Image (cartoon, rainbow, N blue to C red):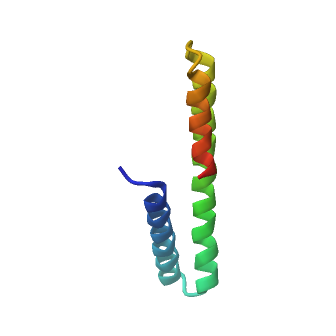
Amino acid sequence: MNTEEDEFKRIEREALRRAARDEDDDDTQEYTSEMRQLLAEAYRCGFEAGAAAEREACANLCESHVRYPSRLNFSAAIRARSQV
């Protein structure tokens, strides 16, 4: 299973690959290394936001559907992963 950092690196590589491909397809559009970094960062931020939203949804589901008192510990542990 890939870690989040592995996924960030994969997304960054894909963003750079797409930027290079688009640059080759359209000579009028030039991507500077700064633009490539910004594109990769946008992908990374989107992934992080999606992961945080998924963790929050899981924590809420745990709180609302688990009937044991330990559910609060479970949901707190899920939310703590966002703090790492």
Task: Out of 20 and 74, give the one closest to the viewer.
Answer: 74
Task: Out of 36 and 29, give the one closest to the viewer.
Answer: 36
Q: Residue at x 48, y 83 (%)?
A: 24
> x%, y% of residue 4?
48, 55
The residue most toward the left is: 1
> x%, y% of residue 74?
55, 29
> x%, y% of residue 75?
60, 30
The residue most toward the top is: 67
**Picture quadrant of residue 6:** bottom left
> x%, y% of residue 56?
63, 36
Say if residue 31 shows up in the picture.
Answer: no
Number of callouts: 0
**Picture quadrant of residue 36:** bottom right
Say if residue 65 shows up in the picture.
Answer: yes
Task: Out of 25 and 74, give the one closest to the viewer.
Answer: 74
Q: Residue at x 57, y 31 (%)?
A: 58
Q: Residue at x 54, y 82 (%)?
A: 26
Q: Check the image and report above or below for 17 versus 60.
A: below
Q: Is residue 38 left or right of residue 14?
A: right
Q: Check the image and report above or below for 19 versus 10.
A: below
